[in-house]
Image: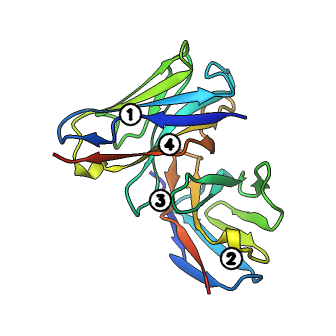
Amino acid sequence: QLQLQESGPGLVKPSETLSLTCTVSGGSISSSSYYWGWIRQPPGKGLEWIGSIYYSGSTYYNPSLKSRVTISVDTSKNQFSLKLSSVTAADTAVYYCARVILTGYLPLNWFDPWGQGTLVTVSS
Amino acid sequence: EIVMTQSPATLSVSPGERATLSCRASQSVSSNLAWYQQKPGQAPRLLIYGASTRATGIPARFSGSGSGTEFTLTISSLQSEDFAVYYCQQYNNWPHTFGQGTKLEIK
């Protein structure tokens, strides 16, 4: 059974870079059938897609965050990572990683399964 | 980007009754719509994709319908474990976008 687990600091200072890793177990991140994505949820609010990555390194980003986001993959560790620069309090959220099925050439699909999420607070 | 609007924001229903949740897209998303259930402190769980296809392991009391801009999630005969927040998500256009959620509470 595929499982995803987020990890990283729970507290980041304003203007610094948020860094999180998602470890995939029970399956290979190098599968040709899937992309891997990051989604976030501010406390008490809705969901926002951040971006998605293929094992080859191909990425898609949300235009609203694109200038500050970098998603990378490490196939040797079965992990993918998120970096969000110049964070502010508005970036405080639970960050989830999830799998996205690839159909055709685009990972425009639903997210399943999801990791349990990790809360990142931006505060000095 | 496509804006997804869910209604109502909160729905109060008694156990055993039917719940009908709505999701509207600001432009057509064809049938490229998913529904998720989220319980407090948990990650969202996929219920429906393709507007009407139940995900693996999802009970038959959950059904989805609609296409274009209007979608419905129906839960027949509500069970205690069904009270949660439900989100719709379109995947027809970049970026993926989600509705703001409908909280289904016990009446």
Asked if badge 2 and badge 1 are on a common chain, one would say no
Chain letter of disc 3?
B
Q: Position of residue B80 (x, y in %)?
A: 70, 74
Task: From the image, tell me which residue sits under label 3.
Answer: B3
Report the Cα–Cα distance between label 3 and label 1. 31 Å
Mark 3, secondary structure of its residue: loop
Q: Chain for mark 2?
A: B
Q: Look at the numbered disc 4 and give the secondary structure of its residue.
A: loop
In the rendered image, the quadrant that contains the C terminus of chain A is top left
Q: Secondary structure at mark 1?
A: loop
Q: Nearer the viewer, residue B103 or B79?
A: B79
- Ranked by sequence position, the earlier of labels 4 and 3 is 3
B61 shown above or below B10: above
Q: Amino acid at mark 3?
A: Val
Which amino acid does the dot numbered 1 rest on? Gly
Question: Where does label 1 land, which residue?
Answer: A8
Give the foreground label among 2 and 3: 2
Which chain is home to disc 1? A
Q: Which residue has dot 4 on it?
A: B94
Q: Marks 2/1: CA distance?
A: 39 Å
Image position of B65 with respect to A36: above or below: below
Pointer 1 local density, CA inside 10 Å: few below 14, some 14–19, many at least 20: some
Q: Is residue A90 above or below residue B4?
A: above
Mark toward the start of the polypeptide (2 vs 3)? 3
Q: Quadrant of residue A16 in the image?
A: top left
The label shown at residue B20 is 2
In this view, the residue in front, B72 or A85, is A85
Left or right: A57 as drawn, with respect to A104:
left
**Residue at left offset 74%, top offset 80%:** B18
